Amino acid sequence: MNERAAASPRATNEMPRVGDPQDACGDTLQQRYQRIRARSAQLAAPLSAEDCCVQSMPDASPVKWHLAHTTWFFETFALEAFDSGFKPWHGAYRVLFNSYYNSIGDKHPRPQRGMLTRPSLAEIKDYRVHVDGRVLALLRHRGDDSQLRQMLMLGLNHEQQHQELLLTDVKHLLWQNPLHPAYRAGDAPGRSSHAPLEWIACSGGLVQIGHSGEGFAFDNELPRHSIFLQPYLLASRLVTNGEYMRFIDAGGYRRPQCWSAEGWDWVVREKLTNPIYWFADGDHWQEFGLHGLTRLDPDLPVVHVSYYEADAYARWADARLPTEAEWEHAAASVTLEGNFADNGWLHPSAAPASGLSQMFGDAWEWTQSSYAPYPRFRPAAGAVGEYNAKFMLNQYVLRGGSCATPAGHVRRSYRNFFPTGARWQFSGIRLARDS
């Protein structure tokens, strides 16, 4: 979800297979399209036009841009490709809302997206309505075209990625406001308690990882392949705020022996002493969230930590981060349920019980695996093939989804990726050890 404008389809030059005409919710493709597109509008609804225009940093995008870019995808890759009578809504949008598709043409500079006061938010909403109407009409006339259906499924999964980015980008934006405004009014998540940490023994051996089955998958999840794992131990839950506070109190941000060389240089350069969104308030910590500023709950998972911080904590705790193969192998035994964005919580929750938990939802989990192609990987042909392969350098893999991820979007094989210093996503820590 590293602003992945659209995923390239499969490990062959084919598009991803849609699978059954109805999704897991029982929706047809038309209903799924309307539901997911409406969800983006719902996420933007609590925000003012001013909120939707501002860009808090080059890695984030304005809400207005997210709404426009996801629409640009359907106009460019569905309508232009499959509608014989295609005419663009506005010729300039092809450049303004292109993310990084070099084969499509020029792009507006990413750090300057917040300068786009025009078109207005109202005009972008009109753009969405126009494109939605044309896509649904195209589906009515060409609904049996498998290539069109596959492209629309790709676009819908792409839009769900941007729904999560919209929330995390808004959180970063509001955090910088000294008023500490809430994205969502109402009560903040209540206090809680977590289950004790256990070490779950995993047998290892020759295992299969990667996507299997007929459902949708991005090409970086393929092909499915064998990998040998040594026996290992996996923590039963995510690291909590309270546990991370002990790392801070022990001088974790001041002890170079806890950090990789590059991580220590990063801590010193950025003058960091705690996770982003934490505020010292006398003898207590407060945490900024989408519900505003609240007292830090020690029993909730620590989030918004970089790979550097996750790795340093693991070293301090006499442990390590799991590999992505270990994570996927362990996740095979867990039901794909969790605290996702649809719950409305929009914050990690405490581990509910003993045993392996929090594998899905709550927080993306850093692994020690570099984001690299699987054996025999080949990117898709055409413009959509620009999505994954060219980012397989200087990134690390995260697994499992977060409290900002739409339910039903992630799979056991889903590979998220970010650079080592990224902290504005809901990224957390699960520990592993050698058996």
Image: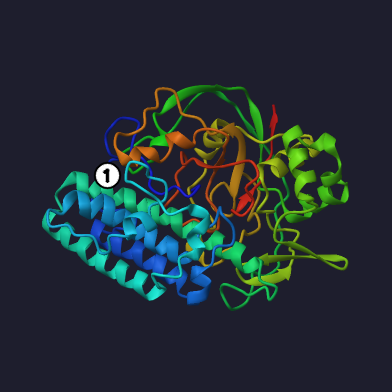
Is 56 left, or right, of 138 in this rendering?
A: right
At horizontal 69% and vertical 39% (from top left) the residue drawn is 431
Q: Which three-letter amino acid code belongs to the residue tagged 1?
A: Gly
At horizontal 73% and vertical 58% (from top left) the residue drawn is 299
**Vertical side of 389 occupied by 105: above or below:** below
Residue denoted by label 1: 19
**Vertical side of 88 occupied by 384: above or below:** above
Quarter of the figure with residue 233 = top right
Quarter holding the C terminus is: top right
* Residue 413: image location, x then y, percent: 46, 38
Query: Viewer-proximal residue, 203 or 211?
Result: 211
Viewer can see residue 47? no
* Residue 93: image location, x then y, percent: 33, 60
At horizontal 47% and vertical 63% (from top left) the residue drawn is 342
> At numbered mark 1, what does the secondary structure look like: helix, strand or loop?
loop
Give the colour scheme shown: rainbow
Q: How many marks?
A: 1
Is 256 left, or right, of 168 in this rendering?
A: right
Q: Residues within 10 Å of mark 1 (few under 14, many from 20)?
A: few
At horizontal 56% and vertical 34% (from top left) the residue drawn is 324
Quarter of the figure with residue 120 = bottom left
* Residue 272: image location, x then y, percent: 78, 51
* Residue 126: image location, x then y, percent: 31, 72
Viewer can see residue 110? yes
Query: Viewer-proximal residue, 361 or 263?
Result: 263
